[in-house]
Image (tube, rainbow, N blue to C red):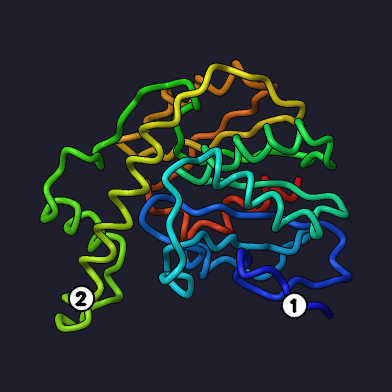
């Protein structure tokens, strides 16, 4: 087996029948999917590790989604040799959409499906409750709500400045990405979360202009995606 790209969290199975590439949300890396299984009924699950976070914390973080998606496609090309789908949560969905545009432009094998979770449509200027105008303390509070397993105060004091900087750069990258509507040639399924006040169901309706769309409202909040594989995978497998 050849070693998988550093953009992928795990070694990929060369015998996998199909793959599910998962893109994370702002301020976090592939560990967003650490509680998801490595495989489902149909797919090998492949979390994507973006530069600037976790085991790639020393790598230069991107400031433009377009540049990120272009380099990501170059890295993923060897693994798009069989049926695959793409899942993106929040920022991850915007990156995934631009990745699909690049795939179309380069006449590469298209994903069979695109799954969007808790994300505005690319042309929308909607901002959720976590945005660049917040103070470092407010951003830290948001990060802590998503990293409750980190209870060591000394460790938190070391990690938090980098985490805040990472989140700010991600938010700036998302804010600057508002391309015109361009349809994609694969169907879309959107997942809104019932307790996600920052990205309500109505905000995801904007994706209807991009392809044929199926819509779901799932129980949970913005970060429930990390623990909801048992809810989402039956839908994706189907």
Relative to residue 202, is residue 22 drawn left or right?
right
Relative to residue 163, is residue 65 drawn left or right?
right
SS state under label 2: helix
Marks 1 & 2, CB-CB < 8 Å contact: no
* Numbered tag placed on residue 156 in the rendering: 2
User: Of tags 1 and 2, which is closer to the observer?
Assistant: 1
Q: How many marks?
A: 2
How crowded is the residue under tag 2: few (<14 C-alpha within 10 Å), some, or many (20+)? some
* Numbered tag placed on residue 37 in the rendering: none
**Can you give x and y, in whole percent of width and height, for residue 110 in the image?**
80, 39
> Residue at position x 60%, y 62% from top?
47
Q: Whole-Å distance between the Cαs marked 1 and 2?
A: 33 Å
Image quarter for residue 203?
top left
- Compared to residue 12, the image places residue 103 above or below, namely above
> Residue at position x 52%, y 70% from top?
34
> Residue at position x 68%, y 62% from top?
45
- Compared to residue 105, the image places residue 228 above or below, namely below
Relative to residue 64, is residue 144 drawn left or right?
left
- Which residue is nearer to you in this view: 200 or 131? 131
- Which residue is nearer to you in this view: 228 or 168? 168
Relative to residue 163, is residue 49 drawn left or right?
right
**Can you give x and y, in whole percent of width and height, for residue 109 in the image?**
84, 42
Split into 4 quadrants, where in the image is the N terminus? bottom right
Tag 2 or tag 1, which sits nearer the N-term? 1
Split into 4 quadrants, where in the image is the C terminus? top right
SS state under label 1: loop
**Can you give x and y, in whole percent of width and height, for residue 62 in the image?**
45, 50
**Can you give x and y, in whole percent of width and height, for residue 103 in the image?**
74, 38
How crowded is the residue under tag 1: few (<14 C-alpha within 10 Å), some, or many (20+)? few
* Numbered tag placed on residue 3 in the rendering: 1
> Residue at position x 50%, y 40% from top?
65
């Amino acid at each position: 087996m050849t070693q998988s790209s550093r953009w992928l969290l795990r070694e990929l199975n060369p015998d996998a029948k199909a793959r599910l590439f998962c893109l994370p949300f702002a301020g976090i890396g592939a560990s967003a999917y650490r509680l998801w299984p490595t495989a489902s009924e149909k797919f090998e699950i492949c979390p994507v590790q973006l530069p600037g976070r976790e085991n790639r914390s020393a790598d230069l973080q991107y400031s433009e989604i377009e540049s990120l998606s272009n380099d990501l496609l170059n890295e993923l090309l060897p693994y798009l040799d069989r049926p695959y789908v793409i899942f993106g949560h929040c920022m991850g969905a915007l990156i995934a959409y631009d990745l699909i545009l690049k795939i179309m432009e380069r006449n590469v094998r298209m994903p069979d499906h695109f799954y969007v979770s808790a994300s505005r449509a690319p042309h929308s200027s909607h901002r959720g409750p976590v945005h660049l105008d917040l103070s470092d303390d407010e951003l830290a509070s948001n990060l802590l709500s998503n990293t409750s397993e980190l209870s060591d105060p000394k460790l938190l004091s070391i990690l938090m400045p980098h985490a805040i900087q990472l989140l700010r750069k991600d938010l700036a990258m998302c804010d600057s990405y508002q391309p015109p509507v361009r349809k994609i040639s694969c169907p879309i399924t959107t997942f809104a979360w019932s307790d996600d006040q920052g990205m309500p169901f109505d905000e995801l309706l904007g994706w209807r202009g991009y392809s044929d769309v199926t819509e779901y409202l799932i129980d949970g909040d913005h970060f429930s995606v990390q623990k909801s594989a048992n809810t989402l995978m039956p839908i994706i497998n189907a």
